[in-house]
Image: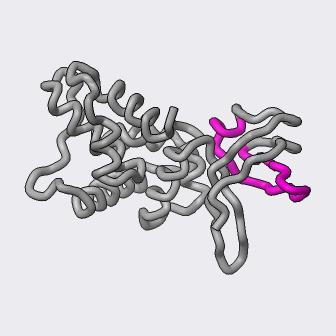
């Protein structure tokens, strides 16, 4: 598995970045965010996912680990292939996606090309179920985001949002440890992602 690529950008087009590493040009299907960060002739690092099917081998490149983790989580949903997952992440950020799942906001997800209401609802349902099985959420439903809720609820919801992005319960807890309980869910998730990416 190719985990990441770091090299010179030699070609750009819509949702495609070609990076030259060691004399080899790697074509990576990428999100609009990753493409907007790239400049021909300059160095760039992409986190990658290699998709191998009977009829195709494709490399996908992402701006950061949260995009990559979110892409992998989307692929775990039945009916979601690499193209649909890429379309979603080209339309909304991983943070917006995580908050949409936690808040049952299927409308945000349907903004992506090729994603209808039924598929958006399935994505939310399956990822919530996955997180409940993989985490300490056992007896209670994952709460809906209420921006006027008590601060400790914001921390719980931010924890869930980070887990939607593919981080473990332990990683998410460490990322949020010590942050102000007065912060909103969005602020907590943003700061948590900064810590997880080492920024």
Residue stretch in magenta? 15-35
Q: Is residue 127 above or below residue 157?
A: below
The residue depicted at 20 percent of the width and 28 percent of the height is 146
The residue depicted at 18 percent of the width and 21 percent of the height is 148
Q: Is residue 55 visible?
A: yes
**Tag count:** 0
Quarter of the rendering containing residue 192 = top left
Quarter of the rendering containing residue 58 = bottom right
Which is nearer the eye, 86 or 111? 86
Q: Is residue 70 above or below residue 51?
A: above
Residue 86, x across and y down, in percent: 59, 50
The residue depicted at 18 percent of the width and 41 percent of the height is 143
Which is nearer the eye, 105 or 194? 194
**In the orientation shown, which residue stands out farthest toward the bottom?**
54
The residue depicted at 57 percent of the width and 42 percent of the height is 64
Q: Is residue 12 left or right of residue 135?
A: right
Which is nearer the eye, 13 or 173? 173
Residue 26, x across and y down, in percent: 80, 56
Q: Please say whether residue 166 is one of the residues in the magenta stretch.
A: no
Residue 92, x across and y down, in percent: 51, 37
Quarter of the rendering containing residue 123 = bottom left
């Amino acid at each position: 598995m190719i985990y990441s690529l770091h090299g010179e950008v030699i070609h750009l087009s819509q949702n495609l970045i070609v990076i030259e590493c060691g004399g080899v040009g790697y074509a990576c299907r990428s999100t609009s965010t990753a493409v907007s960060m790239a400049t021909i002739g300059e160095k760039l690092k992409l986190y990658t996912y290699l998709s191998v099917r009977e009829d195709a081998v494709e490399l996908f490149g992402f701006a950061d680990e949260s995009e990559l983790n979110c892409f992998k989580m989307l692929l775990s949903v039945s009916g979601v292939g690499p193209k649909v997952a890429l379309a979603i992440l080209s339309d909304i950020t991983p943070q917006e996606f995580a908050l949409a799942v936690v808040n049952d906001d299927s409308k945000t997800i349907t903004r992506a090309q090729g994603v209808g209401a039924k598929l958006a609802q399935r994505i939310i349902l399956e990822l919530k179920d996955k997180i409940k099985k993989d985490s300490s959420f056992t007896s209670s439903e994952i709460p809906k985001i209420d921006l006027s809720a008590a601060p400790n609820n914001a921390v719980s919801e931010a924890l869930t949002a980070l887990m939607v992005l593919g981080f473990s319960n332990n990683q998410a807890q460490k990322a949020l440890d010590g942050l102000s309980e007065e912060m909103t869910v969005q602020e907590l998730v943003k700061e948590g992602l900064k810590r997880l990416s080492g920024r």
